[in-house]
Image: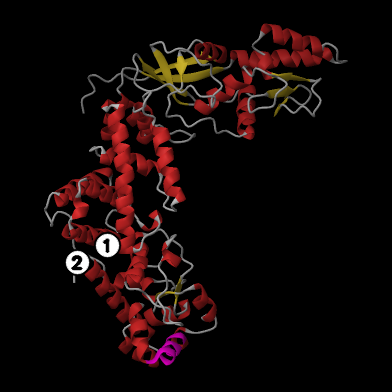
């Protein structure tokens, strides 16, 4: 890799008053991607104690900019002054909470008003604490008075009224001296593009809230007519009201995909070149294709919650497919459905990089254009997987397993009625799925320890009423009573839960292993049909 045009960061050390002066003059600004001040009072006090004791507090990371690349944050979320934009200046990339704390406590405007930055120093105990009007203040000093000559003199005058005034004033002067002379290391990035800065920032080992390319994108796409934060927040709230909560980061990537851009950091940042009308149009399209994707998921998988879609990449592929108009062709829709089943059962996207998702997006584009083999893949699931693997909330295989019950119209072993999919598909919960045979029976059957009965081959669907009724029944008793209760209809009930009636004979010989292996094979056969691999 060539480094000919790269410039190393510039390290410095600067006194606190120098940093404050540069903030007041607009030389240090906050970019719009920063998420606000989030520190608690205890963290503020801890930082002040570190400075007072001469401990290092880490460096600040700046980015020197010479033209308008990112929007400046001008909200009341930070204690910094609102100033006119004048270039060049430095964006604060890392250290926002620390610099906000230090600037805020020394520039708090109203010493009689409580707030996160109104901190006083107890001169008797040499301790920092937040202002509380109900506590005595005679032997304390407000930090906001330290760097104001007038206010500092007034504070010393008040302390002179105390019997041990000399000691108190000496401590106040020492406090002033500590903060006046404290130096903070800073690092400045020079002559770097926005994508470079994103890359640098993602590699910074920060103790604060980690930011990524999505946060930068929120800033770089901003204009007077388009605010991505507002648009995404409105979309997110609308989806929450419909009980289909999608992560904000995924919604931002959805915008990129619908706008014809790959959901990767460098590609997403190219959206800063788009006009506000273009971005607003893309947001309208995002809303439309999300509705189509939700309808597709509910119709074909009974999915009513984003939690049941195991991979973000699957969601983005669905949006791209509908945005390209693929939803009008039943054959293309069937291929897409088979792809979702396959990628979930195979856990195909687990740990895959962004580049893999980009390839999937290219493939679905080919599918939408008429290539019915573009997303084809073979199911690799086998019966052993269902005996080895456990039912775990949030896992792709478990999500597909649940969807298969809904597709199969699974019936209650007690009532014989179909268990309504909305009772277990509204949220990804394990409460309706229990192991039929206890862990000890599985250990005996397979010759190895099974701490949980919820291996997939042993997991059945129960309604809330079923769970109460089955509390004291063994697996054999439950199946026997199901057959006795439903007679000829029992065949249909059992098959809906992936039990071949003829496999019951294994239980007469206490052969739980063969029973569950047969059930696992039946589940795999149904999965293959769903995935188009019979």
Label 2: few (<14), some or many (≥20) within 10 Å? some
Image check: 186 left or right of 298? Answer: right
Q: Nearer the viewer, residue 343 or 146?
A: 343
Q: Is residue 106 left or right of residue 374?
A: right
Q: Furthest residue to the left?
A: 371
Q: Which mark is residue 532?
A: 2
Work out whether residue 37 or residue 488 is closer to the camera in this orientation and state it: 488
Could you tell me which residue is drawn at 27 percent across and 28 percent down? 274
The residue located at (47%, 78%) in the rendering is 438
Residue 325 vertical placement versus 343 (above, below): above
Residue under numbered circle 1: 341
Residue 237 in the image: x percent, y percent?
Answer: 45, 44
Magenta stretch: includes residue 527? no
Q: Label 2 vs label 1: CA separation? A: 9 Å
Tell me where the magenta segment starts and ends, as one range.
478-487
Mark 1 burial class by Cα count in 10 Å: few <14, some 14-19, many 20+: many
Q: Is residue 120 left or right of residue 3?
A: right
Q: Earlier in the sequence, mark 2 or mark 1?
A: 1
Indicate the quadrant containing the C terminus: top left, top right, bottom left or bottom right: bottom left
Q: Please identify the dominant SS of the magenta region.
A: helix
Q: Nearer the viewer, residue 502 or 384?
A: 502
Quarter containing the N terminus = top left
* Residues tagged 2 and 1 counted as in contact (Cβ below 8 A): yes
x and y, in percent, of residue 344 in the image: 30, 60
Verify whether residue 481 appears in magenta.
yes
Q: Position of residue 77 (x, y in %)?
A: 54, 27
Choose top left, top right, bottom left or bottom right for residue 353.
top left
Q: What residue lies at 36% left-to-right and 77% top-to-bottom?
A: 497
């Amino acid at each position: 890799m060539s480094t000919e045009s790269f410039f190393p960061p510039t390290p410095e050390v600067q006194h606190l008053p120098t940093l404050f002066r540069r903030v007041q003059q607009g030389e240090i600004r906050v970019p719009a991607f920063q998420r606000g001040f989030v520190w608690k009072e205890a963290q503020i006090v801890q930082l002040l104690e570190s400075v007072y004791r001469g401990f290092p507090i880490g460096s600040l990371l700046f980015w020197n900019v010479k033209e308008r690349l990112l929007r400046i944050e001008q909200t009341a979320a930070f204690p910094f002054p609102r100033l006119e934009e004048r270039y060049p200046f430095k964006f604060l990339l890392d250290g926002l909470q620390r610099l906000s704390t230090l600037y805020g406590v020394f520039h708090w405007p109203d010493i009689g008003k409580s707030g996160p930055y109104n901190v006083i120093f107890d001169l008797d105990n040499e301790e920092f604490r937040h202002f509380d009007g109900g506590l005595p203040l005679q032997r304390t000093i407000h930090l906001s008075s330290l760097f104001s000559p007038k206010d500092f003199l007034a504070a010393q005058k008040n302390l002179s009224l105390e019997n041990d005034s000399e000691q108190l004033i000496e401590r106040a002067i020492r406090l002033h001296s500590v903060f006046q002379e404290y130096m903070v290391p800073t690092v400045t990035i020079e002559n770097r593009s926005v994508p470079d800065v994103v890359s640098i920032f993602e590699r910074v080992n920060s103790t604060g809230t980690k930011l990524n390319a999505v946060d930068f994108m929120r800033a770089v796409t901003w204009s007077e007519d388009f605010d991505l934060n507002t648009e995404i927040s409105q979309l997110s709230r609308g989806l929450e009201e419909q009980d289909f909560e999608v992560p904000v980061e995924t919604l931002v990537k959805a915008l990129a995909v619908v706008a014809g851009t790959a959901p990767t950091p460098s590609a997403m940042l190219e959206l800063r070149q788009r006009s506000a009308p273009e971005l607003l149009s893309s947001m309208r399209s995002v809303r439309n294709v999300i509705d189509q994707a939700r309808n597709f998921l509910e119709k074909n998988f009974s999915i009513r919650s984003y939690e049941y879609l195991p991979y973000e990449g699957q969601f983005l592929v669905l949006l791209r497919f509908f945005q390209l108009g693929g939803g009008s062709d039943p054959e293309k829709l069937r291929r897409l459905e088979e792809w979702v089943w396959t990628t979930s059962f195979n856990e195909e996207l687990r740990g895959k990089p962004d580049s893999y998702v980009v390839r999937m997006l290219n493939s679905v584009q080919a599918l939408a254009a008429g290539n019915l083999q573009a997303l084809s893949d073979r199911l690799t699931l086998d019966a052993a997987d269902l005996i080895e693997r456990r039912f775990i909330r949030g896992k792709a295989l478990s999500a597909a397993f649940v969807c298969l019950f809904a597709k199969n119209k699974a019936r209650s072993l007690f009532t014989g009625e179909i268990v309504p999919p909305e009772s277990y598909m509204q949220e990804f919960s394990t409460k309706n799925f229990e192991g039929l045979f206890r862990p000890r029976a599985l250990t005996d059957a397979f010759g190895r320890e099974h701490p949980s009965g919820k291996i997939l081959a042993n997991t059945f669907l129960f309604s809330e009423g079923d769970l109460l009724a089955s509390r004291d029944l063994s697996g054999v008793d439950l199946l026997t009573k199901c057959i006795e209760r439903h007679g000829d209809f029992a065949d249909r009930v059992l098959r809906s839960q992936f039990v071949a009636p003829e496999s019951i004979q294994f239980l007469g010989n206490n052969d739980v292993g063969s029973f569950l292996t047969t059930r696992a094979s039946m589940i795999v056969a149904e999965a293959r049909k769903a995935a188009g691999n019979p």
